[in-house]
Amino acid sequence: MKKVLIFTALVLASSVALPAKDETPIVGAIRWDGWYGDGGVVKAVEFSLGQPKYHFRLPWFAQLLEDGKVRINGDSQAIMEQEIAYAAQAGLNYWAFVDYLNEAPGMSIGLNRYLAAKEKKGIRYCLVEEGERLDKEGTQAWSRLVEHFRLPDYQTVLDGRPLLCLFGKTTKIGRAEWEELKRKTMAAGLQEPYLVLMGGEAAKDRHMLGFDAVSEYACSGKGYTTDPETYERLTSYSVSEKLWARWKLERTPCITFASAGWDTRPRQERPPAWCSWVTATPDPTPSAQQKSLIDATTATPDELAAHVRAAIAWTQNNRDLNPANAILVYAWNEHDEGGWLQPTLSANGKPDTARLQALEKVLRPSALKH
């Protein structure tokens, strides 16, 4: 009888611990906010996307000037509030902001505008730190991170753990320092952060740093190239096989990664300063003769929706690997690098929301029935 009671208790305990397979995952998108203000980064992306064949990629708030040039500056609270509305309508749950700490104030405009928004419509946020930048800042960054974790709109997983991503491992900040961040967070009355490492060697390096899971920032296929993979190949091979299948085979804890695309041709032709390894390959085609460069590399709204649907299914079928029940999409606004969900500027000057409308059918199907 005693053995039966013990067995029954174990079964009940394990059933409680197992996550629900059909629980809807939270879906977020990475934000790289090089589209706000009038600094050097904005000028560089204006140049990269300035050719007419790339105008279809411009953020919805961009302007085409009479001289044929492009102006991109989304630095207004009204624009951010509209972005929040777009994300909420599509059914996104959170944004993952690339955090520049005390560097490049212009790159923090988007985050600051988001934080200042009075109505966030349920769109939460987390931070993506970069290993090299964090190594320079050191553990003095911990207090700032804990202050973010305290905010009511900060994204948590697993019943309250603040979600924090690191793109590229730290080399000066080691496991002991990351443990210190956990202690500081719990000393503030919060649960310890859920730490996610991004990058090619993440599955190996996460143990060294004491991280909980891995994910990815982007899947680059062939890398920076003038001959990128098709979107179908990118998602079916670079994402599904090289990431999802490997994580499942190796039993790697993860946040499910999904991609809205990868196409660096604007940066190949007109490389920004931070892409120092890229040799410019200018297109000699006169502006008047250029047509929108939309080909199989560019995700159609239906292709994008199908990929996100597959990411949801994979997450639900692999909850033992993704206990946080979270998905992260590259990206909300990497327009010039090839991955975007954010509405773009259509030929008639109005926002093109086709991608978000397709996502809404996947993420908010019940809302469309009413």
Image (tube, grey):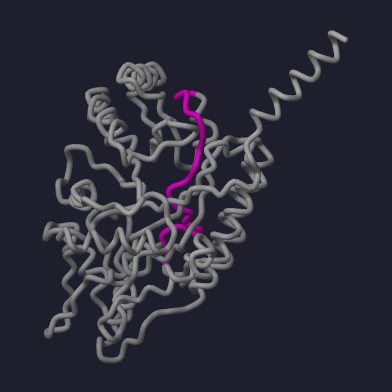
> Looking at the rendering, which quadrant does residue 146 occupy?
top left
Tell whether 55 sits left or right of 307: left
Residue 25 coordinates in the image, percent (x, y): 53, 48
Give whichever of 85, 323 is nearer the camera: 85
Give whichever of 15, 115 is nearer the camera: 15
Tell whether 305 sits left or right of 38: right
Give whichever of 234, 280 is nearer the camera: 234
Residue 11 coordinates in the image, percent (x, y): 76, 24
Tell whether 171 sits left or right of 142: right
Tell me which residue sits at (23%, 59%) in the image: 80
Measured along the vertical axis of the image, is residue 282 above or below residue 114? below
Residue lying at the far right of the rendered structure: 1
Residue 324 coordinates in the image, percent (x, y): 52, 38
Measured along the vertical axis of the image, is residue 313 above or below residue 250? below
Measured along the vertical axis of the image, is residue 162 above or below residue 94? above
**Residue 241 shows in this picture:** yes
Residue 222 in the magenta stretch? The answer is yes
Tell whether 159 sits left or right of 268: right
Residue 108 in the magenta stretch? The answer is no
Residue 121 coordinates in the image, percent (x, y): 33, 54
> Looking at the rendering, which quadrant does residue 309 occupy?
bottom right
**Residue 168 shows in this picture:** no
Tell me which residue sits at (33%, 24%) in the image: 172
**Magenta stretch bounds:** 208-225
